[in-house]
Image: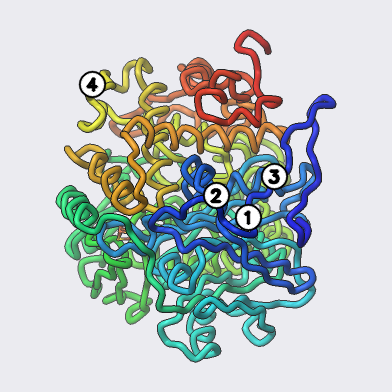
Amino acid sequence: MSESGTTSLRYLNGRKVNDHMSLFPAQRTTFLPGGYMGKILRVDLTNGTLKDENLPEEPILRKFIGGQALALYILLKYLPLNATPFGPENIVVMMTGPLTGNGFTPGGTKMTAVYLSPLTGTTLGRGATSGYWGTYLKAAGYDGVILTGASTKPVYLYIDEGKAELRDVGRFWGLGTRATEDRMREAVGHQDAKVLCIGPAGENLNRAAMLANDYNHFAAHSGGAVFGSKKLKAIVVHGTRRPTYRDKEKLVDAGWRWRGTLQQHNVQKKKTKYGAGEAWGALNNLNWRSTELSPAHIKGFDQNDVVLRPCFQCARMCPWDATIGEGPFKGTLLHFNAGGEWLDSFFNLGIKGNSALYLAERINDLGIECSHFSCGAGVALEAWEKGLLGPDKTNGLKLEWGNVDAVEKLLYMAARREGWLGNLLAEGPKQLAEAIGGDAPKWAVHTKGGTPAMHEWRPMLGQMLRELVASGGMKPQGGGSVNPPPDLRYREKWGPLGRDSADGWARSQVLSEQYRQFTGIFGGCWFAQMHQKPDGLNSIVDAFNAITGWNFTMDEALAAGHRSMILQSLFATQRGWIADFDWQDVGPRFLEPIPDGKYKGFTIAKWLPDLIYEYYRLSGRHERTGRPFKETLDRLGLEEFTPWSQEASQL
Ligand code: SF4
């Protein structure tokens, strides 16, 4: 993108695809809705220039709102079709939403970053994070940041009270995410500054490197790798500004109602829980070859000292710190959020108890997405077990299940691309399995080269569909529900959906993706979205209207989420992805029948590809290509993308 904001035009079959328009007006001519700061910071890392841009005009904000949708719309306008993930032409767009930093509701914390995914090379890469950083970006005066180009030397971006500068980061390059946060705060002289940074994995272009912030929070799915390719170590934000809201009384009321739906985390669960899979009774073990839960998995958790660490003004209380209270890692301080993928990641390698928590802290400090590492290391350990991998390829490590020391060393190798194995772990499970050869590609778990969120999803029809149709380079959204959320029963009737039939799950996924997307683009955190509770969605839409001054109905909110889904497909189809990849480019083990336990023999595979076809049809896209139908674009006000649409009958 040039300084003047112009961009190269894109063509499909000789037709102009996407007219350039000035997204960022020199003078706004429409009102700025509540919740926005009004500015985006544009940073060209190649020549070191920084420029304040006004937010797009109100009709564009009303259509795309913020977060993923507004960021992706900007990316669609400016990212060249021939961009490569690690080339300087890749662009990172980071956006908050009007909810971010409001302080009256739960979940008002989100910042979402989008870019061309280094995991797939064709689909949208997307990471989103909570904590405090998004709130403080707005406190510093900005709704978002656009990063273009690449620096020749390591730098960090410092934004303080509406002023931004790029600074040399030389002595901090190479530090883990924990030390980087601490040193950056010292460097800028504000202990209350908030730091978003990368660790060694991002610096060395591990394809699944994360962005880390506020100790407990991570935007996964490769944003850290793209930062590394741009030699950008961190963005430090500081400020005292506050976003506006249009109707305080209504906002306070909606915030109370929303808070009333929250299920709060508690210390006891952190000391006794196996992780997310406990809810349905299946964990990942031994590279997805067993689903059993055993007391050994959580041995010693009850002796840890656990403290909950809330995000900005959110009573859900997901993040937590722990000090290990027993065993070889006694005294180690840990920082986590809810979700627990990091726990299942090490269970999957045969590691149990506090050793799993210790390694989770290490992987977060290095800044690697845990499922990407675990699915790759799982293939490596299975190859060692079956004699396909020897010490000549492992830097002498014995890759035995449960070998904590070997797995810790593998983490460092993956973060720094050390040796044959470290380099391939940094690439991903698919690439590693192919390089090992033999039967190894059958043991890989991946979706289009990315990896699913690390839980044993295979018994869960709705979650499996969600994982398969996710872009592969981003967190999946949706997941469906057995019955429609109470607030949507005025228009949705299904269920209860079951595991013995695929009927209804596609419809459920389409709808849940819409309300998840809406909450995200508004700047809200999904963990705070209690859609299965009465008022769980209505209170969010009411908070949205009170903040912005708009008057969205629930159906308009869902349409905004739908619009965001369609933009994802437009982005990916412009770059070579087709919907068939969702079921054709999947690591075979992810679709194998469950090997043991109460779900033994179950697999979603018997309903594929029909279930995926149905999902695309119901969401207004072609089932084989993923390109939206023209009527879908017309209905959602996306007519400018009509050249990318497809006739329903056309293959
Ligand atoms: S729901 Fe949890 S992760 Fe989300 S903002 Fe609240 S405390 Fe943070």
Q: Mark 3: give few (<14), some (14-19) or many (20+) Cα within 10 Å.
A: few
Which quadrant does ligand 1 occupy? bottom left
Specify the amino acid type for callout 4: Pro
Marks 2 and 1 in Cβ contact (< 8 Å): yes
Marks 4 and 2 in Cβ contact (< 8 Å): no
Label 3 belongs to which residue?
21
Label 2 belongs to which residue?
57
130 w.r.t. 528: above or below: below
Question: In the image, 535: left or right of 582?
Answer: left
Specify the amino acid type for callout 1: Pro
Q: CA distance from mark 2 to mark 1?
A: 7 Å
Q: CA distance from mark 2 to mark 3?
A: 12 Å
**Secondary structure beneath label 1:** loop
**Secondary structure beneath label 3:** loop
Question: In the image, 403: left or right of 448?
Answer: left
Q: Mark 4: give few (<14), some (14-19) or many (20+) Cα within 10 Å.
A: few
Specify the amino acid type for callout 3: Met
Q: Mark 2: give few (<14), some (14-19) or many (20+) Cα within 10 Å.
A: many
Disc 2 under 8 Å from ligand 1? The reply is no
Specify the amino acid type for callout 2: Glu
**Secondary structure beneath label 4:** loop
- Quadrant (top left, top right, bottom left, bottom right) of the C terminus: top right
Q: State the mark number for residue 496.
A: 4
382 w.r.t. 232: above or below: above
* Whether residue 415 can be seen here: no
Q: Earlier in the sequence, mark 4 or mark 2?
A: 2
512 w.r.t. 328: above or below: above
Q: Residue at x 60, y 48 (%)?
A: 125
Q: CA distance from mark 1 to mark 3?
A: 10 Å
**At which x and y percent is residue 31?**
47, 53
Label 1 belongs to which residue?
25
